[in-house]
Image (cartoon, rainbow, N blue to C red):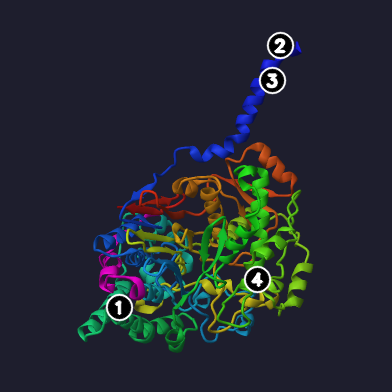
Amino acid sequence: MSAARSPGRAVLCLLFALVLVLPLTLHAQQTAKPVLHGKHWVAITGKPLAATAGAMVFQKGGNAVDAACAMIAATSTMWDTLGWGGETQALIYNPRTGKVVGINALGVAPTGATVEFYKSHGMQYPPEFGPLAAVTPGTPGGLLVMLAEYGKLSLADVLAPAIQMADEGYALEAQSSRTIEKNKKKLKEWRYSREVLLPHLGQEYEAPKAGEVFRQPDLAATLKKLVEAEKAALKKGKSRKDAIYAAYDRFYKGDIAQELVRGTREEGGLFTMEDLANWKVRIEEPVKTNYKGIDVYKLTTWVQGPAMLQALNILEPMDLKGMGYNSARYIHALYQSMNLAFADRDFYYGDPYFPPAEPIQGLLSKDYAKERAKRINWEKNDPSIGPGDPYPFQGGTNPYQPLLEQWNRQAPEKKPAETAQAQLDFERTFYAGTTSVQAADAEGWVVSVTPSGGWLPAVIAGRTGVGLSQRMQSFVLDPAEGPFNVLEPGKRPRATLTPSLALKDGKPYLSFAVQGGDSQDQNLLQFFLNVVEFGMNVQEATEAANINSFQMRASFGKHETKPGKVLLSEQVPPWVRTELKRMGYEPTYEERTSGPINAIYFDREHGTLWGGSSHHGEDYGIAW
């Protein structure tokens, strides 16, 4: 009888083996969206119309920087989780120098925004919404500096699509319509937000409806003033660059600044003319690490980007491919490595222009990564993982040793079961939005951006049409919660914004970014590994299942942490789910587990560009 059953056993063993390798081959399935193939250029961003704006500028003869600026302008005009008063940053590959440069256009805390001020108002953190949540506007300055320094076209050319959209109006998409309607109670608190965003006050549905032509005459007037400043400077014989900087001065020092300050202060905000005039965009050298021969670039500690580089350093010695794509061991390796890196983010990251200097050399040391990896318990999740001490790895002494010891002595807080609404509120703040912009051209220019801030519901500053940032909430008020990120006037909050560029043999290899608050570098880490370790093409990698850890401290709202909580794809098989629960994880499942990842892969063999844009949102790309 046993001999008669042996063929059946063989078949069952074969089927079981096939099921085991199934996760490794999932990426071979047909993708929901096709790869974008381009020979001349690729333009990808968070809205189809904004991608079209990028394409229009490319067709005018612009380079990738011009196109990226046009897309930032259009997405800001469309309120795609940002407004014109938000913040931006970029990584730019300059083919003339062969170097990657960083653009830091994150606003700063205004005069009067002190720890004492917010505590006197009974706040544990700066608020999520309203005029007291706003840092100084950064997106206009970032766009203008990028364009002046690295673009080819005039400001008039680059802003033309956004001006047309604001002046003549555009057909509002359903997603923005629903977001405005959902937040109308908050929007009604602010005079100019109410007037611009709720054209049907008193009706049952007060937001502009999907497909309705949505006009923003105040914003159009502001953007036209920038173009007027450029034209006036050119008429006086100024250079292209100086003419664009004349527009910069009008925004931050002229009549636009005056109305920004007046309108913000009318609503109870803190901006002064000096705050705007003294702020400036910084062109920086980014940080990088090398992962198996690939140089991966990020902006430094004023954003969370180096955390991804730290995680790569921890993961590099591991046989990730041998673990199997999204096996229990692979998921555990990712989760623990990300927690180690993000614990360092929570303690050590902040504005590098305020002392003391962040220990970035030690944080990105390969030897430090090896030391951190020793903390991994391979049998179960470690909810007590805290920041390490990178100072010995750069020959220094930790200036905050008592705070570090205090942090690492704290036991993880055991909280009662939360309500469904509390969970929704936590996830809303954890994933607080941004958008992303990816652009590349045949000349070799590459731009990766994650502009953000001024998302709905936003305070609109007077008659400028400019929606203000909400980034103040990313500060902490107590040094024990992150000594490098304590609020001070003139200081940048540590932001989640995190564009990425990777070079191989000194040439562009990948450009990638994603929206989604604290999940961004988690998703981008996995996207990168999907390509490098698992051989996925750029579109497959954008659509592939991710995991999200919630063990780091959220950068928004109440800055909560949920050790052991993990978001998994519904595709994860039952035996992986069982093993992860045994290891102490608290999984939840969704069909889609990352924000919309946008990316470009550079095909050196054929001299072409491959664009990827995941199917998780309204993100869209065009290539030629």
Which of the marked residues, 1 or 4, is nearer the chain's N terminus? 1
Q: Are marks 1 and 4 in contact (CB under 8 Å)?
A: no
Which of the marked residues, 1 or 3, is nearer the chain's N terminus? 3
Q: Nearer the viewer, residue 177 or 525?
A: 525
**What residue does disc 4 label?**
362
Residue 347 x/y as whole percent: 66, 71
**What residue does disc 1 label?**
226
Q: Could you say which disc has been placed on residue 171 in the image?
A: none
Question: In the visual, does 424 lie left or right of 244?
Answer: right
Which of the marked residues, 4 or 2, is nearer the chain's N terminus? 2
Query: Which of labels 1 and 2 is toward the front?
Result: 2
Q: Quadrant of the N terminus?
A: top right
The residue at the point 39 percent across, 44 percent down is 34
Which of the marked residues, 1 or 2, is nearer the chain's N terminus? 2
Query: Which of labels 4 and 2 is toward the front?
Result: 4
Label 1 secondary element: helix
Q: Give the amino acid type for the residue marked by disc 1 in the picture.
A: Leu
Q: Give the amino acid type for the residue marked by disc 2 in the picture.
A: Ala
The alpha-carbon separation of the residues under discs 4 and 2 comes to 64 Å
Residue lying at the far left of the rendered structure: 235
- Residue range in magenta is 147-174
- Determine if the magenta segment contains residue 294: no
Answer whether residue 419 is visible to the viewer in this image: no
Location of residue 417 (image quadrant): bottom right
Question: In the visual, does 403 lie left or right of 192?
Answer: right
Residue 72 x/y as whole percent: 38, 66
**What residue does disc 3 label?**
9
Which of the marked residues, 4 or 3, is nearer the chain's N terminus? 3
The alpha-carbon separation of the residues under discs 3 and 2 comes to 10 Å
Query: Which of labels 1 and 4 is toward the front?
Result: 4
